[in-house]
Amino acid sequence: MNNQTINGEKWAEMIRAASRYLEHRKGIVDALNVFPVPDGDTGTNMSLTLQSAARNLDQVNAEERNHFGARAEAMAQGALLGARGNSGVISSQILSGFATLCREEAAIDGATFVKAMDAGVKAAYKAVMKPVKGTILTVSEGAVTGGIQVLESGVTDIEAIIAGAAAEALKALELTPTMLPILKQAGVVDAGGQGFLFILEGFLACLRGEVLEGESAPAIPTLVADDDVENLMVEDQIMNPGEITFGYCTEFVIKDKEGQINLDKIRDYLNTLGDCVLVVGNPSVCKVHVHTNEPGKALDFVTPMGSLHKMKIDNMREEAEKKERLEDKKIGLIAVACGSGVEEVFKSLGVHRIVTGGQTMNPSTQDFVDAINSLSAREIIILPNNGNIILAAEQAAKVCGGIVHVVPTRTVPQGIGALLAFNEEETGGENYRRMKEAAGKIITLEVTYAVRDANYENHEIKKGQILGMVDGKLTLTAEDCREGVLKLFANTIKQEHELVTIYYGQDTTEEEATALGEEIAAQYDWLDIEIHAGGQPLYFYLISLE
């Protein structure tokens, strides 16, 4: 095929190539995040989103695989459901708008490609409530401008058009620091814009037949990448109690430094114990899932093969009974949480489904869709509890239809504050308004550490320093955690505050948290102070002021 048109097969090649290209450069994009906290994951989120789009390319009938529109729609569906984080959701909207314009096309030419890019950018703008110049939106606009310029010069070759689009996208990317002062101060370009440029460069590499070092092997994982084995989420369909043959959903991770785990042997044995067997990973680390009536036998069998981690055994009949009881409820509650203690707090406040995620591990749109579909309530309320997760939750609400309310909680304490305002006797809409208002009254203090040297706003940050934030805004740096927390309180606490709730993370001991709470109580004797084991990663403390 020449480069005057692209059919379905060629488009599939281009998307897969772009996915590989971005996957190998996601670290570059992650490093461009201006805020040096350990959750700079723009590149990771965009890469996972594009991988989901690439995996879905083959979800078309064999006779349609050469049809551009069919492939593009499959790509868009995969991106929409696999979107993670704000950057991933915006990327998925660009791909969705692109596909919508080409739905009926068996093949597209250069002019249609540019029109489709323009439609994608417009769709992305509509998806963002307050579009900001100097972001991926600006860079993608530049790409459209570049494509139009090539067409107007009389050139219709698609490779030339994408090259022109990439050139103008690069110019727009280099200008992003002039549009966003925070980028200029940090000395970086926009991370999402750089990710988008890498996608265009991946298209070009495919059209030119270029295979770069380290990218010749298939990069679209069938199930899960090695680094994500431990965090693989396995969704179980909840059946009626009487339909369940094997009653215990059993999951665990096996690790062996010598790399001697025999995945086939485990898989064969577990198939004799039950069903829904999943054994994924590699000989050094693998995740296991099985439904069985004898979970002890499963654990006994694998124990000699390595050390066991993240063991979880759930009574499926009990879960099914809970679902049956939920059908009588008007409103189902879904919350995002990471950390055993934080999850337990949400469950104790009536949350029916926990979506695992948060900092560094943004759940996908599909994760929310699965949670929504697992509930039979008439209305659903979602608490994202992270500013980078809100768009994915909202996208899931659109995909699922029905009545789904997304309360835009940006922190775990805001989510907890919102739940305390929930009234099951009211409608979902009434609760949405009450919960949003309640969340807005919560002040959240967060204490973490810097992953690299950086200039951020008025702070000279050194790698390893403690970072203290108030409602997501960096307030101070400190040399140790205790000092950072006490400074945060001194800068933030007011006489009208009454309650302080401290959730300490997995890297903080109970003794450290208790001593800190006692020190705060001694300095601010009018406050009621509660301390809970949150178990959250990366953040030493999450603190709520009310």
Image (tube, rainbow, N blue to C red):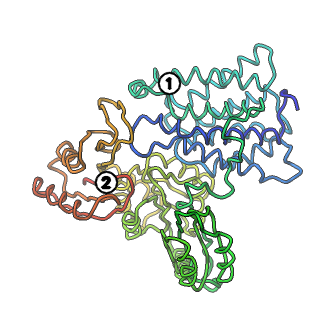
- From the top left corner, tell me how far across and down residue 363 is, in percent: 53, 54
Q: Tag 2 or tag 1, which sits nearer the N-term?
A: 1
Q: Is residue 154 left or right of residue 55?
A: right
User: Hey, which quadrant is residue 200 in on the image?
Assistant: top right
Report the amino acid beneath label 2. Answer: Phe
x and y percentages locating residue 245 in the rendered image: 65, 85
The residue furthest top is 153
Q: Which mark is residue 540?
A: 2
Which one is in front, 5 or 422? 5
Could you tell me if residue 72 is visible in this image?
Answer: yes
Q: Residue at x 22, y 49 (%)?
A: 485
Could you say which is closer to the camera, residue 250 or residue 520? 250
The quadrant of the rendering that contains the C terminus is bottom left
Name the disc covering residue 176, or none. 1
Residue 372 visible at all: no
Tag 1, which secondary structure?
A: helix
Q: Which one is in front, 395 or 289? A: 289
Q: Residue 528's spot in the image, x, y percent? A: 18, 61
* Label 1 – label 2 distance at C-alpha: 33 Å
Give amino acid for label 1: Thr
Residue closer to the observer: 25 or 406: 25
For residue 345, side relative to residue 478 (left or right): right
